[in-house]
Each structure stands twice: as structure tokens, then as C-alpha cells.
Image: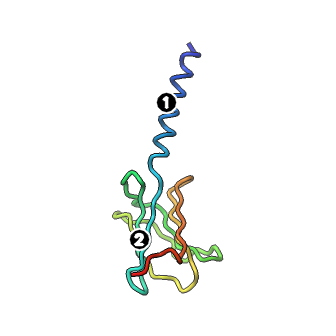
Amino acid sequence: MISSFRPALLMFCAGFSASALAHNPMCECKAIDAEQIQCTGGFSDGSGAPGVTLDVIGYDETILVPGKLGSDSTLTFKKPGAEFYVLFDAGPGHVVEIDQADIQAP
């Protein structure tokens, strides 16, 4: 009986690993003007990411702007004076980093 259970268990687990790969994290940041930046996060399956951590971090690893995406999966923040990157962190394997140099100008 156990030997017939193993193939079913393998198929069950394979289904979970395929679904886990089906939604990759996505994040985009744009400068609204010279002072404000807006980031939008979500997943490749089209789902949003409300409540997901999105921190603005200095090159010295100091968190300059701690944040979470709002109900519309966006966060708007004042552009820091120091060099920075944005970290979208939806958990292990679901992290996106965006360097300040990659943020689109208005």
C-alpha cells in the first residue's frame, strides 16, 4: 500500500512546486516628479501585493524609508538625499531589488 502512495505523493508535490513558480514577484518604481517616487508591486500572475514590505535602503544598509504597499499595491515616498535602492520583499524567493539608477524619470 505504501509503494502505491509514493507516486501519488510525488505528483501532489510536483503540482505545488509548479504553482509556486507560476507567480514571480514584480516591482516597478517611477519618479512622479523631482521629489516623489511611486513603486508598484505585484506578481506575474496578475495578483497585487497589498501589505507586502517595500523598504527604501541606503547603500550603507540603513533603512531610510520603512514601508508596506497600500491596498492598491503602491507606495509613494520622498526621494532620499542619500544613494539608495528599493527592496520589495514578499518572502523567501520573492524578493526584488531596484537600484536608484534604474528608477524611471518623470
Work out whether 55 lies above or below 17. below
Q: What is the C-alpha distance between the residues marked 2 and 1?
A: 37 Å
Chain-order first, disc 2 or disc 1: 1
Res. 81 mark: none
Work out whether 2 lies above or below 55. above
Q: Nearer the viewer, residue 102 or 48?
A: 102
At a point 52% along the width and 69% down the height, the residue shown is 98
Q: Are the residues at dot 2 and dot 1 in contact (C-beta closer than 8 Å)?
A: no
Location of the N terminus by quadrant is top right
The three-letter code of the residue at mark 2 reads Leu
**Residue 16 coordinates in the image, percent (x, y):** 49, 37
**Residue 44 coordinates in the image, percent (x, y):** 42, 54
Residue 2: quarter of image: top right
At a point 34% along the width and 64% down the height, the residue shown is 72
- Residue lying farthest right? 60
Q: According to the image, label 1 marks what residue?
A: 12
SS for tag 1? helix
Work out whether 4 lies above or below 38. above
Residue density around tag 2, few if under 14, some if 14–19, many if 20 or more, within 10 Å: many
The three-letter code of the residue at mark 1 reads Phe
Q: According to the image, label 2 marks what residue?
A: 75
Q: Nearer the viewer, residue 102 or 20?
A: 102
